[in-house]
Image (cartoon, rainbow, N blue to C red):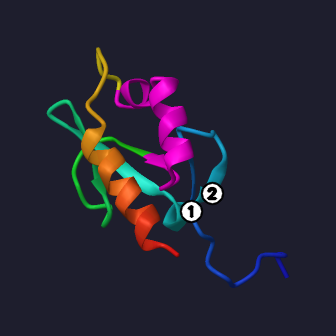
Amino acid sequence: MSGRTRAGACPERTCVGCRDRAAKNDLLRIVAVEGVCVPDRRGTLPGRGAYVHPTRVCLDLAVRRRAFSRAFRGPGALDTTALRRFVEQGEQATP
């Protein structure tokens, strides 16, 4: 016996806002498209991705820390208005 379990391991990612590790399924993947942060719900958009909890608190932390420009290795600030709108709609939909 090797000590390994047969259960499939769930990949983990780090939230760029709060820096906590969580299951990949619990985080929202963000991709930079032409200077705009776009939510990638299906995880299929090409390019480098950054992960954030789909909450307003983690999004605000990431914006304040300039984590998106660092994660995407971009020269300046990225537009996060579409991302903020997406997160706020998701929070309103969840009871």
Q: Is residue 71 magenta?
A: yes
Q: Mark 2 packing: few (<14 Cα in 10 Å), some, or many (20+)?
A: some
Verify CB contact (< 8 Å) between mark 1 and mark 2.
Answer: no
Magenta region includes residue 10: no
Part of the protein shown in magenta:
51-72
What distance separates the C-alpha of mark 1 from that of mark 2? 9 Å
- Label 2 amino acid? Ala
Front position among marks 1 and 2: 2
Q: Nearer the viewer, residue 11 or 82?
A: 82
Name of the residue lying farthest toward the top: 75
Is 38 rendered above or below residue 89?
A: above
Locate residue 80: give its quadrant. Answer: top left
Left or right, residue 53 beside residue 18 = left
Task: Name the residue nearer the viewer: 61 or 20.
Answer: 61
Q: Is 52 drawn above or below residue 72 in the view shown?
A: below
- Disc assigned to residue 11: 1
Residue drawn at the location 26% of the way across and 61% of the way down: 44
Q: Is residue 37 above or below residue 9?
A: above
Residue matched to label 2: 22
Residue located 56% across and 44% down the image: 57
Name the residue located 35 percent from the left edge and 24 percent from the top edge.
73
Would you say 88 lies left or right of 36 here? right
**Residue sitting at 50 percent across and 58 percent down?**
27
Type of secondary structure dominating the magenta stretch? helix
Which comes sooner in the sequence, label 1 or label 2?
1
Question: Secondary structure under badge 2?
Answer: strand
* Disc 1 secondary structure class: loop
- Residue 48 at what x, y percent from top left? 32, 41
* Left or right: residue 62 compared with residue 29: right
Q: Position of residue 89 (x, y in %)?
A: 35, 61
Residue 30, image x, y percentages: 35, 47
